[in-house]
Amino acid sequence: MKVMIRGNESIAYAFKLAKVKVIPAYPITPSTLVPEKISEFIANGEMDAQFVPVESEHSAISAAIGASSKGVRVGTATASQGLALMHEVLFIASGMRLPIVMGIGNRALSAPINIWCDHQDMMAQRDTGWMQFYAESNQEGLDLGLMAFKIAEDERILLPAMIGIDAFVLTHTVEPVEMPEQKDVDDFLGEFVPHYVTLDPKKPATLGSFGFPQHYMEFKFGQWVAMEHAKKVIDEVFEKFANKFDRKYSKVSAEFMEDANIAIVTMGSMSGTAREFVKKMREKGKKIGLVKLTVFRPFPKEELLSILKDVPVVAVMERNISFGFGGAVYAEMGANFVNESKSPKILDFIVGLGGRDITFKTFEAVLETAERSLKGEKVDEVNWVDVNKEAVLKVEGSL
Amino acid sequence: MHDIPIAMYEVRFHGRGGQGAVTAANILAIAAVKQGFYAQAFPFFGVERRGAPVQAFTRIDTKKIDLRMNVYSPDAVIVLDPTLMAVVDVTSGLKEGGIIVINTSKKPEDFEFSGYKIATVNATEIALKHKLGSQAAPIVNTAILGAYSKVIGNVKIEYVVEAIRENAPAKREENALAAKDAYEQTILRW
C-alpha cells in the first residue's frame, strides 16, 4: 500500500512493523516525531511495546542497552547533540554485542547552534562499532530500518546499527512510500529469539563485565570480525529483501558508470539531486557517473575498488569535515586505494554543512573542478563548495 | 487553467505560523498522489513560531521525484495571509506568467503584479463560516486548496476534498466543505 509519510514516520513505521518491544527515547529536533508517532501507536493499541520516557539521550541509550540485554527487539531515535551525548554509551552497546537499531535525523553539531542537515553527528560516531546506513529517501529509511534489525540480529554479527535520514530534507518531507504488509515483514524478519545469555532473574549472569588486558583485545577482535562478516550478511539480507519486496539495495550503487571518466560519490538525500544532475550532464555528452554509498560501516571497500578502479577522477561529496585532514569519506576512499597498483585521482568536496542547500550549482562547481583535474590540472584535494571563503579568510588570515 | 503538468510543477505556500501552510502543502501532495501523480511536500526548514512568516512547498510530477533541493522558481505561489505581502516578496523567483493565489476580500484587479496571473478568494470568510479556527486566527489552509484546484487545476477538486477528509487534523467535513466553497468562489483574472 502506498502511503504519504515523512522520513521520521518511516523510522516509526519500521519499528512498528518490526514489532519492536522497547523504545526508550528523548525528543530532539529534527527526530522528535519518531517518539511522538510511536507513543501514538502504543496509545492507540496498534503497537504492543513499552515506551520509556527518559531524562536524556544518555539515559535513552542506557535504557536501550538494559532492554536489549533482556533479549528483546529495541529501537530508539535521536540526532545531533543527542547522539553526541550518547557517545560513551554507544561503545557499550556494540561491545556488549546488542542488536539495537537507532534512527538518526542527521543534523549539524553546535556551535553555532544549527538544527539543519549534515552528517557530522553520525560521522563523529564512526568508531563506536555501530553499523551505519544512510537513506536517500523515506522509502529507504523504512526499508533500511527493517533490514537493520535482520542484519544486526544475525548471530554472525550481533552489532547495533544506525540509519541516517537527513534532517528536514527527509525527516520533515512528505512523499510516497510503499508500506509493506505486516505478514510479509513477519515472514522476512521473524521473531527475535536470542540464542545467547540474556538478563534473566532465574538464571543470573553478569553482562558487560570487566575485561582485563589478557581478554580485552580478543573482545575487540571479535567486533572486528563481526563487522567483516557484516559485509556478507548485509548483501544476503539485501537480496532476501529484494526477493520479498521487489526493492533492490546495495552497499554501493553505481549509475551511469559504464564509460564514466568522472564519478561523483554521494551519501544520503543529496544522491537524488545528484542523479538528476548526472542525467542532465549525460544529455550534454559529459561522461559523468554517480556512486551512492548506502552503507558506511562496514566500509564497502571491495565494491568501491571494483567500481572505481578504472575511473580517472573520483569526486567525493560529503556533509562532514574532520578538521586538519578533510572529509571522512575522502579519507577512507584514499586509504582504500593506497595499496592498489592503480588509483583514481580522488578529490574531496565539503558541501551542505548545517543545512546549506545542495543544488545544481553545487554539482556544477564540483564538476568544474573535477574536469580541470581530468585535464591534468593541479586542483585542491579538499574543496569547500558554496562557501564565502573571502569573508572567512579576511578574518582568519589567508592560506 | 493548466492541464496535467508535462514537466515538474512547483508550488510555494506563504503563511504565518499556525495558519496551516505546511499542512496545506502536505495535503496538496497527498491529493496529487491520489490522482496518480508523484509528489513531495516540505516546509521551509526554519524555526517556526506562531505568527511568523512561514513557507511550505509542494512538488508534483508525472514521474518519481528525485530532486531534493529547495524550490527556487515556483510555478505558483499561494498566499494564505495577505498582510504578508507587505513584508515578504511573494513573487520572489516566481516563473514568468506564474500564478498567485491570494486569500483576500479584494479582487484580482486590486493587485498590481505585472507579468503574473492573479486569483483571489476570501478564504478567511469561508473558514469562519465553517467555524475553522477562531475569529482572531481562522484556519484558511483547506479553503485555499479549493482555490488552488480551481485556478491551477492540475489536482482536481475531488482528490483535494478526499485528501482533506482523510488528513485534516480536526473538523474534517467542515474543512472539506470549505475547500468546495472556495472552489466555487475563487475569482481569476487572466
Image: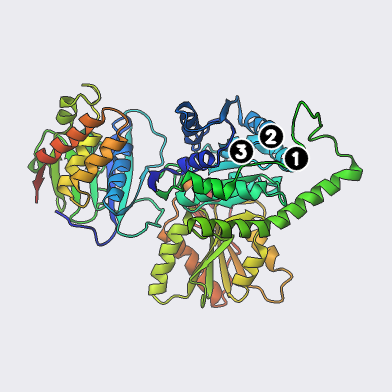
Whether residue A398 sits left or right of residue B177 in the image: it is right
Which numbered mark, 2 or 3, is in the foreground of this view? 2
Q: Tell which of B54 and B8 is nearer to you.
A: B8
Disc number at residue A65?
2
**Does any portion of residue A250 appear in the rendered image?**
yes
Q: Residues within 10 Å of mark 2 (few under 14, many from 20)?
A: many
Q: Between disc 2 and disc 3, whose residue precedes?
A: 2
Return the residue at label 3. Answer: A83
Amino acid type at circle 2 is Ile
Give residue A87's position: percent from left, percent from top. Answer: 67, 38
Specify few, some or many for label 3: CA neighbours under 10 Å numbering under 14, 14-19, or 20 or more: many
> Do the residues marked 1 and 2 share a common chain?
yes
Q: What is the tally of numbered marks visible in this picture?
A: 3
Q: Are marks 2 and 3 in contact (CB under 8 Å)?
A: no
Report the residue at 19% width, 44% height from top: B158
Going by the numbered disc 3, the residue's amino acid type is Leu
Q: Look at the numbered disc 3 and give the secondary structure of its residue.
A: helix
Return the chain for callout 1. A
Q: Chain of mark 3?
A: A
Residue B101 percent across, percent down from the top left: 18, 43
Between A93 and A127, the one nearer to me in the picture = A93
Q: Is residue A144 above or below residue A257?
A: above
| Residue that carries the numbered disc 1 in the rendered image | A96
Q: Is residue B148 left or right of residue A366?
A: left
